[in-house]
Image (cartoon, rainbow, N blue to C red):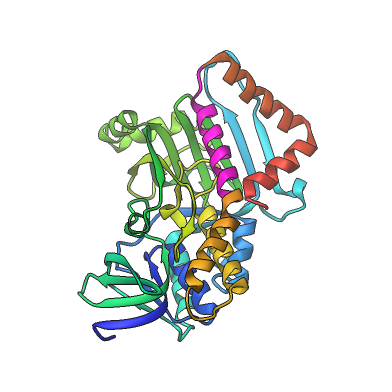
Amino acid sequence: MTDSARVEVLVVGGGLTGIAAAVACARAGLSTLHLAPKAPPDRRTSALMMPAVRYLDEAGLVADPAALGHPLRQIRIIDATRRLLRAPETLFDSAEAGLPAFGWNFPNIRLTDAFAAAAAGFPELSARDVTLRSLVPAESGWRAELSDGSLVVTDLVVGADGKKSLVRQAGEFRSRERAFTEAALVCDLELGRSIGNCSVEFHYPRGPFTLVPAGGNRANLVWIDDRAVLDAARAAGDDALLATFREKSMRLFADIRLATPTHVFPLSTLTVDEAGRNGIVLVGEAAHAFPPIGAQGLNLGLRDVADLAASLVACDFTPGLWGRRLSEDYSRRRAPDLARTTGIVDALFRSLLADMLPAQALRAGGLWALKSLPVLRHEAFSMGMGNR
């Protein structure tokens, strides 16, 4: 590429949502440049619900989920608090909804490899190991300066560059952020007793302790608690940490061993007033970020990409300001889903942390209703999986 070039779409951000967005743009026949700087391997996992898994198939990103991940067929919720009003233990089974599984748990490394293989099949798509330095309006789009000093002019910019998005800042999107004192500890565990295909959530006063099946006797742990509690647990050493894990899991799985190192991530939320404007669309954590509650995260990012793909199909690419028109259409498509998901995740997270008796009663009553009423369970299945 020369020092100055023109493409129809510039995608900024090398994560899974960024690759998926770049593939969607290339699939629409647009010349697409993907800025994807190299990063350390992402050793986390992503629990993708069936609507997201179906999109991966439709987009040609993952044809056979069984080749990459592990099915999630049940969700078990256990109130492990000592509150006065405790919720009943509740089991959700995908068979009740007529589904073979609620979704699939994928290692992010495997997803990245599959997405990259799909991207390689599009001659319209090129990727560069550089970052975005600046982004300014141009006559009919945007002019980007890259970290190697080169310039690119484009009709449409897709910001997939995370919570600290430079694209979001350059586009002057209004956003709201909130940091929590809670954090998330994640790692892989080897259990003495298989968890099967059931994700188990132990609800504690400062957040859930969740084990997600990862095949065999392995499980992915996501433990949410005060940051100081998590840091102290890690600092106590592996033996003490594993004893804590056994206690938190009520000793249901016999022996527990660490399969990977532990990592602690701060928790915060980020929302934007609109997801697209003036020839820029925001996808993934550039547009929204939530605590790891309700299996949103990448699910919501892939719904962003699905709506971007729909906007591309509907777009009139008459030369001129098509990028602006597309970004406005994308924003309209995303608004209802983002508003609904923001409300659900915020309410769920707050309910898990609430100590007030009215909140405890509502949470316990809600789970009793879900346990007893099939109609409500089906509605919960639909909302939890992101059906629209």
What residue span does the magenta drawing correspond to? Answer: 337-355
Residue 340 forms part of the magenta stretch: yes
Residue sitting at 67 percent across and 37 percent down?
91
Task: Locate the N terminus and report the quarter of the image it occupies.
Answer: bottom left
* Spot occupied by residue 80 in the image (x, y as percentages of width and height): 53, 25
User: Measured along the vertical axis of the image, is residue 133 above or below residue 127?
Assistant: above
Does the image show residue 64? no
Q: Nearer the viewer, residue 296 or 207?
A: 296
Horizontal side of residue 334 vs 369, given as left or right: left
Q: Left or right: where does residue 180 sit relative to residue 347?
A: left
Viewer can see residue 33:
yes
- Tell me residue 52's x, y (percent): 59, 59
Q: Residue at x 64, y 29 (%)?
A: 89
Q: Is residue 302 left or right of residue 141?
A: right
Front-most of residues 158 and 17: 158
Magenta stretch encompasses residue 361: no
Tell me: 195 left or right of 94: left
Q: Residue at x 44, y 60 (%)?
A: 108
